[in-house]
Image: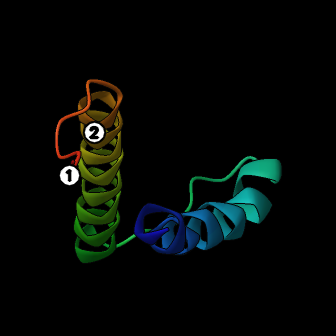
Amino acid sequence: MLAGLISIIPTIEFLRWRVDLQQGRVPAISAERIRTLRMIIHAELAAIVLILLCAALMAKGIGLIT
């Protein structure tokens, strides 16, 4: 759920770029904004890797309380 929520920020930013790209212009993006978007995308990827790791561990029965 967290990975889905933080993906809203880059999605909105990419949609804003669409107008400039359709007009053949390069979107004006500050270095700070690029750094922020990169950090968010890396956090998303880390969250997805963690979800996959937990799913694999659950499939093996690790953490099962009997």
Q: Residue at left 21%, top 48%?
A: 66
Q: Is residue 25 above or below residue 60?
A: below
Q: Are marks 2 and 1 in contact (CB under 8 Å)?
A: no
**Crowd rating for badge 2 (residues with CA inside 10 Å; few <14, some 14–19, many 20+):** few
Q: Residue at left 22%, top 65%?
A: 35
**Circle 2: element type:** helix
Q: Position of residue 42 (x, y in %)?
A: 25, 52
Is 65 positioned to the left or the right of 47 in the image? left
Q: Residue at left 23%, top 75%?
A: 32
Structure colour scheme: rainbow
Amino acid at circle 2: Val
Is 6 positioned to the left or the right of 45 in the image? right
Depth order, front residue of 10/52: 52
Pick whichever of labels 2 and 1 is earlier in the sequence.
2
The dot on residue 49 is 2
Depth order, front residue of 21/8: 8
Is 57 positioned to the left or the right of 34 in the image? left
Amino acid at circle 1: Ile
Q: Is residue 41 above or below residue 59?
A: below
**Closer to viewer: mark 2 or mark 1:** 1
Q: Position of residue 20 (x, y in %)?
A: 71, 61
**Crowd rating for badge 1 (residues with CA inside 10 Å; few <14, some 14–19, many 20+):** few
The dot on residue 65 is 1
